[in-house]
Image (tube, grey):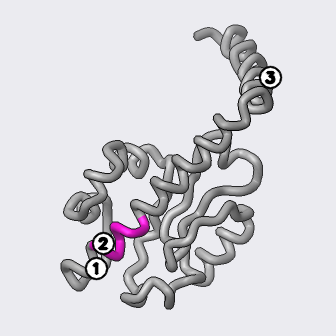
Amino acid sequence: MNAGRQKWFWIIAAIAIPLLLLLNPNLWDLSNKSVRYNLEAIGSSIYEFHNSTGEWPQGANDLARTSLPLKVHHWRYLIQAGNVVVIWNRDLLPDPRNNANRVLVYHNQGLLAAFGHKWVCWGDLRTEYASNAKIRSAIAQQ
C-alpha cells in the first residue's frame, strides 16, 4: 500500500472504529471480556506450572506444558507478537493472594491499550484496567 492510501486507511479507521463502538457498545464489552479472559488464563497457567514443577515458568515453552493451550488456542501468538507481555517473575510466592501487587501479564496492543490504560492481570489473578503509569510503577518495584 502506498503512503497516500495508507494515510487514508488510517483516517477512515480512526473515524469508523469509534463510530462502530458507539453504535454497538456490546462490541466494546466483548473485546474487554476477551482480553480479560486471555490474561486470566495466562496468569493462572503461571501458577499451574509452578504447582506441577516447583519452578516458575521462564518462557512461553514452559506455559505449553500447562492447560493454557486447551483454554486459549492462540496463546503463543499473543505472547510472541507482543499483544500481551508476560513478566517472567522468579520470586513469586506460591499463594496468589500474597502477590497482589505483582504484575503477571498485561495487554499491550490494540485499541483497548491505546488510550493510556491497559488491562493487567495482577499476581492475585484479578484483572484491572490500569493506567500505564501504575503498571510501569508496579513492574519497576518488582
Q: Are marks 2 and 1 in contact (CB under 8 Å)?
A: yes
Q: Which residue is mark 2?
A: 57
Mark 1 residue crowding within 10 angstroms, few (<14) / some (14–19) / many (20+)? some
Left or right: 115 in relation to 45: right
Q: Which residue is mark 3?
A: 15
CA gap between label 1 and label 3 equals 45 Å
- Residue 124 in percent (x, y) is at 51, 79
Circle 3 sits in a helix, a strand or a loop, which is it?
helix
Q: Is residue 81 visible?
A: yes
- Residue 114 in percent (x, y) is at 70, 45
In the rendered view, tell whether residue 108 sits above or below residue 94: above
Q: Which residue is mark 1?
A: 50
In the rendered view, tell whether residue 142 sits above or below residue 82: below
Dot 3 or dot 2: first in sequence order is 3
Mark 3 residue crowding within 10 angstroms, few (<14) / some (14–19) / many (20+)? few
Left or right: 36 in relation to 70: right
Foreground tag (2 vs 1): 1
In the rendered view, tell whether residue 97 sits above or below residue 59: below
Q: Amino acid at mark 1?
A: His
* Residue at (59, 42) in percent of width and height: 31
**Quarter of image, res 21:** top right
Part of the protein shown in magenta: 43-48
